[in-house]
């Protein structure tokens, strides 16, 4: 069979006037080429997207139907200014002798700036542009959902910026028409996939809202996905995604105003019922009220601050951060020992990942213990505040070499209880420290929510800030 470039030269001129030129994208069976030769009065550059499907008999028919699903979706949404416009399409058969073995499916569209490419090139969208993207893509999703379509793959690679600064949603290749508003097939890009989709559960258009929320969070988090930063190792990025799916509470993204952050965090809720009920509802929330919202926000903030109670003990507090604690957590004390580490003990019944996110949101991490001196400092702090069970900052969830500290520090010092770690049940991946009557302070490998088996009044975790932590 001829190469795709050779076949395209044979198909040209496409739609009577277009000549394929440079390939600018390739991913599996899909390629995108620039086009030349179109009518100048159209005033914009175009590309041709080529999807090649191969097979025989029923397999080929199904593959072609899957590709034409995108064409059907774009035709259904023609006229929505926030969806990429399909101008032309065509199908060319491929033969092996006299046998039909495939099709080249061609789609002509406007050449636009891909948001994923902008991020790869280091461009940072200002908050005002992120707000425009949020409204435009929410409008696109609203139109799609009203047409019975769930996109299922909202991500930067499928978002485009027009020459006049608008944003459009493209690539409906895995969009599906849903009956009664729900689907149960698992598809999409994992990093942006809604938890219910990842679990293979029935889902609806709110899965698209989750994906859009993750994109917006990334754009306001210096290009990084939730629970990640530019220094997060690749091996830990999958773990961060799983933590989101498990319902780990996300800290607000660092950029954007308080109102926009609240909207994004609501979209990113792991439980669909906690998100906006529809894309239309999200779009309405994104339209800033003409008045009143600022007063309400200030009043709400004042109420939140009033509800916080801190019990502070007489330790040096020069470096105390201005942190606001959720009702489920109370900071009992903070101390600045030697060796450049500052600790705070927090009383709360959170699982390990929630505790780590809580510390990360405040610029620190769950405490690491790499020496007997650090062990003595932390246990003395716990005893003074009558906390008997805490999380420490280590796990072996994604490590084949045993427990690892979240900071990457060497895991040489250890204070395991007799017979530990034993990975009882096969899912004890998180480091817990507790005071055992016959052994004193010891370490134990635990399930993620192991503290719930202890007295809530004596459970918590220890946050640590290092000299290099801002």
Image (cartoon, grey):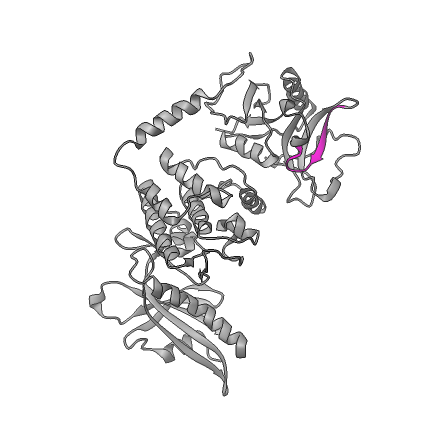
Asked whether, in this view, residue 141 is left or right of residue 356, the answer is: left
In the rendered view, would you say 104 is above or below 358?
below
Task: Tell me which segment is drawn in magenta.
Answer: 440-450
User: Number of numbered discs present?
Assistant: 0
Front-most of 359 and 304? 304
In the rendered view, would you say 385 is above or below 11?
above
Q: Whole-percent x and y of residue 267?
A: 44, 43
Occupied quadrant, residue 111: bottom left
Q: Whole-percent x and y of residue 243?
A: 56, 42
Q: Whole-percent x and y of residue 418?
A: 79, 31
Occupied quadrant, residue 288: top left
Residue at left offset 34%, top offset 61%: 77
Residue at left offset 38%, top offset 49%: 279
Magenta segment main secondary structure: strand
* Any part of residue 124 in sight: no
In the rendered view, would you say 12 is above or below 81?
below
Occupied quadrant, residue 353: top right
Residue at left offset 43%, top offset 53%: 154
* Any part of residue 179 in sight: yes
In the rendered view, would you say 45 is above or below 435?
below
Residue at left offset 43%, top offset 22%: 305
Is 407 included in the stretch rendered in magenta?
Answer: no
């Amino acid at each position: 069979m001829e190469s795709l470039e050779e076949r395209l030269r044979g198909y040209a001129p496409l739609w009577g006037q277009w000549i394929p030129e440079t390939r600018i994208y390739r991913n599996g069976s899909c390629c995108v080429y620039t086009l030349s030769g179109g009518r100048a009065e159209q005033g914009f550059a175009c590309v041709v997207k080529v999807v090649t499907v191969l097979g025989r008999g029923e397999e080929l028919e199904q593959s072609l139907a899957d590709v034409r699903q995108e064409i059907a979706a774009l035709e259904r949404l023609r006229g929505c200014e926030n969806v990429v416009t399909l101008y032309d399409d065509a199908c060319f058969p491929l033969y092996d002798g006299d046998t039909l073995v495939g099709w080249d499916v061609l789609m002509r569209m406007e050449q636009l700036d891909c948001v994923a490419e902008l991020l790869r090139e280091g461009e940072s969208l200002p908050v005002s542009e992120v707000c425009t993207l949020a409204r435009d893509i929410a409008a696109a999703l609203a139109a799609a959902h009203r047409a019975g379509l769930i996109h299922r793959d909202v991500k930067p690679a499928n978002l485009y910026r027009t020459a006049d600064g608008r944003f459009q949603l493209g690539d409906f290749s895995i969009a599906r028409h849903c009956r009664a508003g729900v689907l149960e097939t698992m598809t999409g890009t994992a990093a942006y996939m809604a938890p219910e989709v990842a679990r293979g559960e029935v889902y609806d258009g709110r899965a698209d809202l989750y994906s859009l929320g993750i994109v917006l969070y990334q754009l306001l988090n210096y290009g990084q996905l939730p629970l990640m930063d530019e220094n997060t190792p690749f091996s830990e990025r999958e773990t961060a995604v799983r933590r989101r799916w498990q319902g780990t509470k996300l800290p607000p993204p660092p950029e954007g105003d308080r109102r926009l952050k609240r909207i994004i965090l609501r979209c990113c809720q792991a439980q669909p019922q906690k998100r906006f009920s529809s894309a239309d509802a999200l779009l309405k929330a994104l339209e800033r009220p003409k008045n009143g919202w600022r007063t309400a926000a200030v009043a709400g903030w004042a109420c939140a601050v009033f509800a916080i109670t801190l019990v502070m003990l007489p330790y040096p507090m020069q470096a105390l951060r201005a942190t606001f604690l959720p009702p489920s957590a109370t900071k009992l004390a903070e101390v600045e020992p030697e060796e450049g580490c500052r600790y705070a003990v927090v009383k709360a019944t959170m699982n390990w990942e929630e505790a780590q996110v809580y510390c990360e949101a405040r610029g620190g991490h769950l405490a690491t213990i790499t020496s007997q001196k650090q062990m003595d400092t932390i246990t003395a702090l716990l005893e003074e505040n009558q906390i008997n069970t805490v999380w420490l900052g280590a796990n072996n969830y994604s490590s084949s070499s045993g427990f690892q500290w979240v900071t990457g520090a060497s895991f040489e010092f250890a204070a395991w209880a007799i017979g530990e770690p034993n990975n009882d049940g096969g899912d004890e991946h998180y480091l817990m420290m507790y005071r055992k009557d016959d052994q004193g302070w010891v370490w134990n490998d635990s399930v993620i929510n192991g503290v719930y088996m202890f007295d809530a009044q004596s459970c918590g975790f220890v946050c640590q800030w290092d000299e290099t932590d801002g």
